[in-house]
Image (spheres, rainbow, N blue to C red):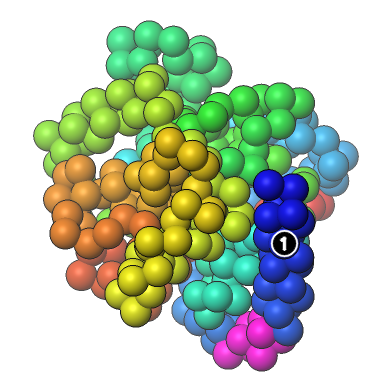
Amino acid sequence: MEKSENYLAIVYEFLYYLSIFLLYFIDPKLEKQWDNVYKLEIKVPSKYKGSIFELEKYFESQLEERVKDFSTGSVLLIQNGSERASSMVRAITAARMSHCAIYLDPSFASAELIPNLSPTLLNRPLLWQAAGEKQSSEYGYKSEGPDLHSMARFLAYYVTVYPKSRFVLRPLKQQMSSANIETIKQFVAKSADQQKQLFCSNIQLTWIHHTALKPFRFLQFLDHLFISENKNRDDYTFCSKLVAETYKHVDIIPKDIDSNAFNPSHFSMPNMTDIFSTKETEIVFNYV
């Protein structure tokens, strides 16, 4: 088992440096896609820089008003310019984005919806996401499966730990109906409460995603090399899979498409213009 883990670590290291090499050529071409992105600037006092908790408090005072034009079901997209796995995701998909989450407006969550919901998540913008790298108890991310996160806390964490990141909100072409929002609430509540799914490791994510694509599906018989004993690929989750499955739950995305085949950039421009608005808005945090 130890030899197998060492081999995978070597493969992962090789893939990372290959990704850096590929991004050197890919990023200049992708840069043009940012030209038509709207900007939403949030000025941040410099004294909060580097303090996740102070930034969280400040973002909480700003976000609800600044993102009020976005409704539940919009997608948050992130380009992480620092983290290794994110660089690999972008290189392999030749795309801008490395993470995605579903935005939920302040009216979404309630104690009645999720009995064990932390009071800190009530009446504020939230993100429904699979963010496995955020399991640090120091910053309050202790979940083992898909979960609700404070948007303010998540962004405070990200701008501090990954300062080269960029954040984009993209709304649905048509707002969700009240019935669809209620369906999403029940789906989120059940999933967050049960937390049956496991986060993928970086190697598992790469394997599960790519062998869900049509040209590589024949390789799924090798799943046992990457997936833990007594588990299967449906037991694992990652950000774009969770977003796809949530949208499928209200028939926004066709249910016959394998959720494992989605990556974050499927939800960004110029993709899915029949489902999402062509307008992307980048949240820009400028220290003053």
Q: Is residue 174 left or right of residue 244?
A: left
Residue on which disc 1 sits: 7
Identify the element where label 1 is drawn: helix
Residue 135 appearing in the image: yes
What is the magenta range? 22-29
Whole-percent x, y for residue 99 in the image: 53, 56
Q: How many marks?
A: 1
Tell me which residue sits at (33%, 69%) in the image. 217
Give above or below for 196 relative to 256: above
Which one is nearer the viewer's eye here, 70 or 91? 91
User: How many residues crowd around disc 1 within 10 Å: few (fewer than 14), some, or many (20 or more)?
Assistant: few
Residue closer to the observer: 244 or 168: 244
Please tell me whether residue 99 belongs to the stretch shown in magenta: no
Q: Main secondary structure of the magenta part?
A: helix
Viewer can see residue 69: no
Q: Amino acid at mark 1?
A: Tyr
Q: Is residue 86 above or below residue 14?
A: above
